[in-house]
Amino acid sequence: MTPRRAARSPRGARSGGQALVEFAFIFPLIALIVFGFIDVGRAVFQSNTLTNAARQAARVASVNQLDPVAGPWTCLTDHPVQDPANPGWTFRGCAVAAGATAGVQAGNVSVAYAAPPGSALECTLEINIGCIVTITVTANYVPITPVAGQVIGPIAMSATSSMPVERTFP
């Protein structure tokens, strides 16, 4: 007669609790990595949005140099600018419209006109055809990852676009 062994519970019954404890230890790390990937994607999206806003504003500023002191700054590019005192579209308005998802405001848009390198063209006091318009759009990016958002804080992002002036207006 063979000695009788003590009955054991199946191995899978005890490992279920162990797996749950291991998962509880590793879950915060997995969540942090997932939120990190989401934050990186949001940062790339905001960078692309700022680049598109700067490009759109530079395209408008190359044909319409109006920069009203007060808003509303609009972007109706399918309408001609008929009244310089009340323009239907301005480069600031187009930058704000294109950068709305990134929180771009009119104060986040700056413009500069300069002569092309090696040119004697006057561009500081009077804007002439051929001057280079440079638009810079800035915005702050705030990560949503709890730890990164508190440690890193808001990140200043900017995009710049330059184009030659094609016509002067008004």
Image (tube, rainbow, N blue to C red):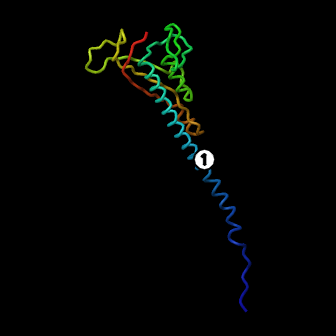
**Image spot of residue 125 (x, y percent):** 36, 9
* Image quarter of residue 74: top right
Mark 1 neighbour density, 10 Å: few (under 14) some (14–19) many (20 or more):
few
**Image spot of residue 133 (x, y percent):** 39, 19
Residue visible at 58% across and 40% down? Answer: 147
**Image spot of residue 131 (x, y percent):** 34, 17
Q: In the rendered view, would you say 43 is above or below 74? A: below
Foreground: 30 or 161? 161
**Image spot of residue 128 (x, y percent):** 35, 13
Q: Residue furthest bottom?
A: 1
Foreground: 50 or 164? 164
In the picture of the structure, the residue carrying the numbered disc 1 is 31
Number of residue marks? 1
Residue visible at 56% across and 36% down? Answer: 143
* Image quarter of residue 120: top left
What amino acid is found at the position of numbered circle 1 in the picture?
Ala
Residue visible at 72% across and 82% down? Answer: 5
Residue visible at 61% across and 48% down? Answer: 28
Local secondary structure at mark 1? helix
Residue 106 left/right relative to 23: left
Q: In the rendered view, would you say 149 is above or below 58? A: below
Foreground: 13 or 122? 122
- The quarter of the rendered structure image containing the C terminus is top left
- The quarter of the rendered structure image containing the N terminus is bottom right
